[in-house]
Amino acid sequence: MDSKQGLFSGLRASASGMAAERARIDVVAKNLANAQVTRMPDGSGPYRRQLVRFSTVMSNAFGKKAEPIGVKVDGVVPDLASPLVRVHEPGHPDADAEGIVTYPNIQTTAEMADLITAVRAYESNANAAESFVRIAERGLRLAQ
Amino acid sequence: MDNVNAGNQILSRLLSAAAMRDRVLAENIANQNVPGYQRRVVSFEETLRERMLAGRSSTDVTPELLIDTKSPAGPDGNNVSLELETNAMRENRLAYEMYATILQSRMGLAMAAVSEGR
């Protein structure tokens, strides 16, 4: 990336982790907000739970072995595996001929658990960055 | 003596590039909610290093303000990530302190030399 890559790689890894975990928090928030949406703006069925896929960022220094240097959001993909929730609700405007309304495949408890782990992961990355800065400052004091 | 001066000069240029980067990163953070804003970066160390490795004069290398079009943008076209900006700021501050510390110790050496070690 640049000349300070090696020196600050720890700090950059933590920063990438924080950015990625925040993306996860954003997606969980979106899922929770849309938990009851039975109809998408384009007229298609209910909202589908979104999942974040992370991937490792590898270094690409010339002539050196590639090493993991951080994490990035690879993409946000819909969860097509878990089943949509079908509820008998004949009065609902989006009910089908049999009076069944299809709700998104979102379980609030699972989303909350995801949210908590994402927040914890964010905090641990922030703590690691904090420690890196403290250690670097301590190292600099040796030269004074 | 020429070498000592050249080294100090590079250090002070690195310091001013770091100071400029700090301003630019602050600008990015200030613009984090502006739709379509693309983050600015300061490029200096890399060009300097290339020149020095090639053994050519680096006195005309100046910090360059570039627009980062590569970082992924959100739905509003803004590609500032608060986490990455604040960490870049921390990193930059540490680099600044490092350059300042080295410069200070070099100045100390020069002072010791002119005062005959007293």
Image (cartoon, rainbow, N blue to C red):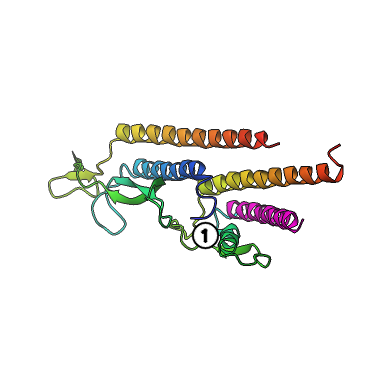
- Which is nearer the eye, B36 or B92? B92
For disc 1, the neighbor class at 10 Å (few under 14, some 14 to 19, many from 20) is few
Q: Is residue A91 visible?
A: no
Q: Secondary structure at mark 1?
A: loop
- Which is nearer the eye, B21 or A82? B21
In the image, the segment drawn in magenta is B1-30
Q: Is residue B60 visible?
A: yes
Q: Residue furthest left?
A: A98
Q: Position of residue B101 (x, y in %)?
A: 70, 42
Q: Position of residue A101 (x, y in %)?
A: 20, 44
Q: Residue at x 39, y 43 (%)?
A: A24
Magenta segment includes B105: no
Q: Position of residue B12 (x, y in %)?
A: 72, 54
Q: Does residue B55 appear left or right of residue A96 in this picture?
A: right
Q: Is residue B112 above or below residue B80?
A: above
Q: Main secondary structure of the magenta part?
A: helix
Tally of marks? 1
Q: Position of residue A136 (x, y in %)?
A: 59, 37
Residue matched to label 1: B35
Q: Residue at x 37, y 45 (%)?
A: A27
Q: Residue at x 42, y 35 (%)?
A: A121
Amino acid at circle 1: Pro
Q: Does residue A25 appear left or right of residue A137 in this picture?
A: left
Q: Residue furthest front?
A: B116
The chain letter for the residue carrying disc 1 is B
Magenta segment includes B4: yes
- Which is nearer the eye, B48 or B106? B106
Q: Quadrant of the C terminus of chain A?
A: top right
- Which quadrant of the figure has residue A36? top left
- Which quadrant of the figure has residue B59? bottom right
